[in-house]
Structure formats: C-alpha cells, structure tokens
Image (cartoon, grey):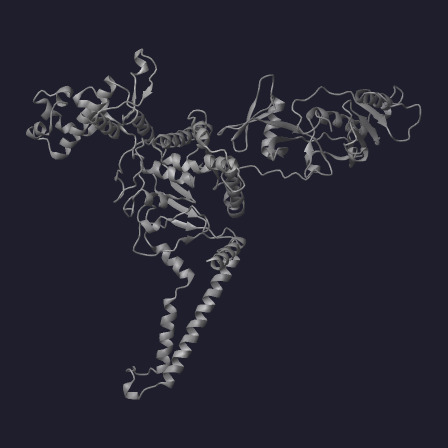
Amino acid sequence: MSEGLGPEGGHSQPAPTITVQDLSDRPAHTPLDRITPVEQVSGVVEETSPSSTSSFELVDMEPAPPLYQPVQPHWFYCRRVDSKDVWLPFSREDSERLEQALSTAGEEEVVVAVEGERYDVRVRERQRYAVYWEQGPSEVRRCTWFYKGDKDTRYMPYPEEFSTNLEEAYMIAVTLDEWKRKLDFPSGETVILHNPKLIMQYQPITLQDEWVSSPSEQTRPRTVKRGVDNITAEIPDGEPETIDHLVFMVHGIGPACDIRFRSIIQCVNDFRSASLSLLGSHYRRGQEEGRVGRVEFLPVNWHSALHGDATGVDEDIQRITLPSISRLRHFTNDTLLDLFFYNSPTYCQTIVDTVASEVNKLHSLFKHRHPEFTGAVSVVGHSLGSLILFDLLTNQKTGSGEADRDEGRNRDPCPLTCDALEQALCRMGLQEHLATLQSVDLDLDSLAMCDETDLTELGIPLGPRKKILSFIRKRHFLQEGRQGTVLLAPGLQALPDPSEDSPSPTVSFGNQSSEASARRQQFLRAQSITSAVDYEYFDVGIGQVSINYPQLAFHPQTFFAFGSPIGMFLTVRGLKRIDPNYTFPTCKNFYNIYHPFDPVAYRIEPMIVSESDLEPMLIPHHKGRKRMHLELKESLTRMSTDLKNNVLGSFRTAWQSLVRMPVAALPPVEDGETTAERSLQETESVHEEVESPGSAEDKGRQVKVGMLNGGRRIDYVLQEAPIESFNEYLFAIQSHLCY
C-alpha cells in the first residue's frame, strides 16, 4: 500500500480518480469503463424511471426497501507502540459523542472530552491531546473501511478519503446488484469487489532491484472489511461518569516504572484498567444502581523536571562520567543517582517542590473539569516516591491548604535579613522579650553589640539568650561577607558581587590567615543549607536535610506506599523508634504494601511495636482468599504439624508405660482421670501452642499498631505467584550449594 493510504498516513489527500472495471460477463453495448459512480447511479435512475404511459401503474405500488444501508462509522485514535502505529477504537459512547459533534459542528473547531475527560479531541483538526500530562498529539480518524494483511494481527483503518471512495463504489455495486468490480487507484492500489462478503486489495508491483521481494509476494492480497462490526475489534466499555475517588501516583527512581521499562503514564493506565475491571466484576450491581462510581488515577512525574535543562545536572554528571561500560553508567546516572539527589539539599528541594506543585496543579485542573466532584483524594508513592510523600505529609500544616501554601511562600527560612528588632524576634519566636529589650532602648544594631553578660543582666533566660547570640553571630558574618567578598568555600574567595557594577567574580585560592579562615568556616556552617538532625516529630526524629516543604492544596484521605524504603531511610537517618501516638497532620490512613520479593521494600510496624514480632497482613486475592499453592503449602504445614504432635504424643504415652514407676511415685491424678487422658491433654496443649495461619491473621488484625494508621495494621504483603515461589526455592537451593 502506498504511503498516502497506509495507517500511518498523516493528512488526507484529494479524492483520487477511480477507474472502475466490470469483471463480469456483460453485453458489449453496456460499457462501464471510465465512468464515474455518479454517472452510474444517474443512469440506473433514468433506466428505471417510469414513462408517462406506465406511471399510473406504479402510483399505488409501495416502493421496495433499499438494499443499501449507509455504513456506521466508528472513531479510532493512533498510538505508537514499539515503533509501530497501532489504531485503537474509542468506546461507543465516545465515538457517538464525536460523531454528533461532527454533524453539528460548523466552521469553528469543536473540542470533545473523551476517555474519562483525560483527553480532548479537536474534531475538525482530527487530533487528540492529553489534559493532565505532557504527551504529543495523536491522530484521530472517522473509520468505516478496514484492511488486514497476512502478517497483520488486527484490522487497520483506511484514511477517510480512501474509505469514502470505497463506500461510493460499494453503494453502486449494491444498488445495481453487480459485483466483480475492479477499482484502480492512481496510487497503484487495486480493490476488487467480488461480492458483499469478499473484497480484496492488491498492492502495486514495484521491482526496483534484484534484492526486493518477488511479484507474488508483493501482490499478496489484503482482506478488506466494511464497518467496525465486521472486524474483531475490542471496543472498550465506557467509563462511569461519576468519580468517587481521586488518586495521585508518584513514581520512584528513573524514568521507567517497571521491569518492562514503561513510563509512569502507562503504568497508571494499567492501574485504571484494573480498577475498572474489578468494579465491573465485584460491584456490578452497585454500578447499575448508581451507587458506585469509579476511581480516577493521575500520574505525577518529577523525574523530567530534575533531569531537564532547568537544573543542568545531567550535563554536569556527564562531564565526570567515565567512558567505559557506557550503558551501565548511563543507567546508573539516569536511575540510581536519584537516591543521592534526594539526599542532596539542593536537588531535594527541587524534587519536593516539583511533586507538590504538580499534585496541586493536577488537583486544581481536575476540580475545574469536574466541579461536581465531592469524593476523597488519596496519594500513592512507589519506591522513592513513597519516601517523598512521607516527608511531605510529615511536614504539612493542619490549617487550610491555601493558607498553608501562602505561609510557605512568604516564610523566610533564615531571619538574618531582618531590618527591625521586632521582626527578628518574631521570626525567632521570642516576641515576648520585645518589651524587655525596648525598655533599655535597644534596636537591632545595638543588640548586635551585646554579649551574653548584657543579656543576662536584662533577665533574658538561657534558651532565648542562646538564640539571640547565635542570631547576632550569624548576622555579623553575613554582613561581613556582603561587604567584602562572596564566600564560596573555606579558603576560597571571589571578587565583589557582579550585581554592583563590578567585573564577573573570579575564584582564587588565596593564603588566608587562620583567624579569617576560621571565621569563614563558622559562617559557612551557620549559613549552610544542610543542618543537623532536627528531632521534632518522633521520640527520636527523622533527620532529613533542611528543606522548606511546600503545602498541598488538600488533605489526603489515605497514603499508600508501594514497595517503599521508608523504614530503611528512617533508620539510616538515626530513627530507632516511631512514637506510637504520632500521626500525619493532614492524613488519617497509611498503608505500606509490598511484594515479598521486592529488594527495596521495608516494613514500618517493627519501628512502632518493637516488643512484639508481628507478621505482615496477607492481602487476599481478588478471586479468592489465597492462591492455590499458598493454600496447599499451609495445608501441608498443618498436616505435618498434626502428624508430628500425634507421633510425639503416642511416643510419650508408650515411653511412660515402659518406664512406669511404682504407683506411689506417680503424680497425683484427679478423680476420674487416667494417665492416658492426661497424656492426651498434654498432647492437645502442645498442639494448641502451634497456631494456625488463620488464627494468627485474626489475632494480627486485633493488634493496635500505633496511631499512624488510626490504630490499624500498616504492613500488608502481596501473595506471590506460583512461578515466583518456585524461583525462590531455586534461589535458596543455589545459595545453599554455593555457601
């Protein structure tokens, strides 16, 4: 097929002049070569129109129903998959909306929201645009005719102009009831209408050299179908209009989110599809009654902002990267370095700002497109994304989201730039001592000349006195640095600031005195963006770098952590134990969900309840309680335990009968009780000590694990698949043989 007629063809071409040949045996006086479809139809009308003498015979006759029925179009969109263009159908509801918009549209462009209002289609432009994320536009077609070759897995739609010409030829063939027609297109394609159910397309023969395929291979026909109902197209079901829950999903390290190297958008689409499938299989009655809506998942991408041109970090890393094993180093720079970036105060601030601003932007856009939405909003983080959300939720304020964001924007993290005494004391939280300092006519400049003895004589307590002295010292070094040089590092000096009409600063390694070097080091330690561990929220603390955490525009209902290293990072930061009474300021629920074989997943509950050994809660499978191999494993374990206890009890009874001492030496036996019954009771007591998995799970649900999840369990483990469990056994055997 030529370039203009293939599925990858972009803009439609002018309607070609079609040469129609009749391949059936017709009289010689009825030529059909090189006549247009309009002339054929008009000729048929003239031949069948009644004359003046016979018209009265047809007046009372009912007209015969037309055999030709217009084709029902269906709208498709193009998606790039594995370097190929794949055409996918819209749902019937979206296709009907697009068709209605086309029929009622005038000269102006009409925009139709499709696929749960996540995309907008410009009908006249035939382009589909993403709403919530950055994605290039994709082509949209109003499809009526389709083709499929021998090597194609699905039917592909023809361009609209080509389909229109095929439909006209089909209409003439049906109206005249004459088939075996050959349609020659100027581009070289040939379509033969053998009968209503057999239509074939032949591609042109172009032998350019001896290395191309043979004519028999090139002219292999394609099957042509009319209408979407005649092809095996999986038309998706429409999504419910009502949205009950909104979920923002934050990815982890790297641009890819799974082992198939798919993007966050593709993975979130799978979550959405799985959610819709579960709603249809488990809550069909609720959907039919209108009591259950759907869950909307939206991706939050921060990797592109960190590795984009705005930061320039990729260029800096590339300059110092070794040229050997380039693929492995490129993978490391693109993925694993995100962990180090998050521990860097500079890039950590970029990451948290990007995540918060993206979530707030998506939330605002969603509320604008769904003003009737009144459901809950939750957040999901995978891997490093869960740690980002954990730190954000830990540093949220309990007030309104809008007020908190304004406070975050207006808050100065360093009060050293204050010009008034009152302002400085307020930012240090010492405004109650303002009257004491003003009583002796102290301003900010005179306060800078006070020492600890002066403040003690004024009656300033030890804690506020230390804060004031630290402020005086930092402000003094800051002013000295502004008046002299721009300090870059200890022992590193630059010329005056270029903002003051001076040449560009140049770095010089000068021989500085020990006193000046010590003062610069002290100043830089005071002014460094990193800080010591700030134990504020737990009984020991979380110890993240000094970051000005932004505020979210909403209070999340639930925080889901998937494959999360939160527990490991908190431990590395110096946290030994989480206060059982601690809760997120704005989020009530927290679930740590992981796969048992995830190498970067860690638990949370042992950091809260360290005195008890709690097994994680097993998540039931959506088709049943547990997978078959897990049920079989537990049954075999229970059977072996029962067998061992019974054998142990029988052996104990037999041994006691063999080595039985005189009756006087036996332990006292209650009235009506025999030694056999006692042995049976002992065996039962041993058996009761071995709890079944079900009872352990029931007891685990009743355990109160702090208040981080409202007293409920936090750690939940997924059920591994049979092949995963088999691989675990193979790995264990291999490790045992190696060591």
| Residue 474 seen in this snapshot | yes
Snapshot quadrant of residue 82: top right
Q: Residue furthest right?
A: 28
Q: How many marks?
A: 0
Residue furthest toward the left? 457
Q: Position of residue 183 (x, y in %)?
A: 80, 27
The residue lying toward the viewer, choosing from 555 and 83, is 83
In the visual, does 506 lie left or right of 445? right
- In this rendered view, identify the residue nearer to me: 716 or 576: 576
User: Where residue 6 appears, x then y in whole percent?
Assistant: 70, 28
Q: State the image coordinates of residue 593 (x, y, percent, origin top left).
A: 42, 47
Q: Find the residue positioned furthest to the front.
A: 511
**Relative image position of residue 4 (x, y in whole percent):** 70, 24
Q: Residue at x 28, y 86 (%)?
A: 665
Q: Is residue 674 above or below residue 308?
A: below
What's the residue at 36%, 46% (across, down)? 567
In which quadrant of the rendered image does the N terminus lie? top right
